[in-house]
Image (cartoon, rainbow, N blue to C red):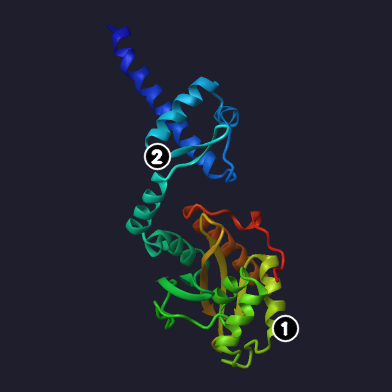
Amino acid sequence: MKKDLDHPVKSDRNTVQSVARALKLVSITANASAEGLSLTELSNAIGVSKSTALSLIRTLISFGYLSDLKPGPRYCLGTSLIKLGDIASQQRPLGDLCRPILRDLAQETRMTTRVAVNDSGYPVFIERVDGPGSIRFYTPLGQREVPYASAAGKAILATLTDQDVRKICEDTGLSPRTSHTITDIDSLFDNLTLTRQRGFAIDDEEDAEGILCAAASFFDHTGKCAGAVSITGIKGDIPSWRVDELGRILRIRADQISDLLGGVVYSKLNHAIRK
């Protein structure tokens, strides 16, 4: 009797293992180059025989999750994932996806947190979580903000080519918003170089007197900058070491958003100055 009862348990375990291996195959293929991966490479990656891997691959191909490239064959992602990705983006808008991270960031930094999408180089904030305490900042959502004077804007600009940055600055002008605003293109490029090096941008009273903002960019599955996450607070007597600490915290949170979007973390991107 006990022997009979053991069969369903073993069967369930095998099923779960097969599902895990199939999902791992999709994940590994997603991180491969456009040329795809061979059967040998995939079987080695999940630690199974070629026959077992081929059985899983054929099942994934039948559902459109993988596709075979000729000659070879070599395997890449299937077109069914395009539809699923589109549905997922509709079911979980970016603001909803980021809200738990914004809440954690607000508690961790004690500052107001926001997330902006990249609208052709301009930050458009779509979600906000106020920091603990009584201070509330007027931070409207859904409208383009000046990129050169905001931390989120500079975090996004730092991912663009110099040519694109020049074009945006020509369109907006570099008019002063405070006495601290960067108003010449060479100084802005120097600031963007520093932003690339440290992985986050700073708005040190450049958009509003007495206000300090920091922001870090995040990336989607194509490697493109999808937006930036930022924190805003009263500058007061915040020391430089604390600003650096806040920037590192932001970088971690931005990488978490990149991961949710299927993108890569900042440290793995090429941050050379691009012309």
Q: Residues within 10 Å of mark 1 (few under 14, many from 20)?
A: few
Q: Quadrant of the C terminus?
A: bottom right
Residue 158 on image: x %, y %: 63, 71
Residue 186: numbered disc: 1
Furthest-left residue in this view? 1
**Amino acid type at mark 2:** Gly
**Amino acid type at mark 1:** Asp
Q: Secondary structure at mark 1?
A: helix
Nearer to me, 132 or 231: 231
Name the residue at 44% across, 81% down.
137
Residue 4 on image: x %, y %: 29, 9
Name the residue at 41% across, 71% down.
126
Residue 239 seen: no
Nearer to me, 224 or 178: 224
Furthest-front residue in this view? 71
Is 177 located above or below residue 238 in the figure?
A: below
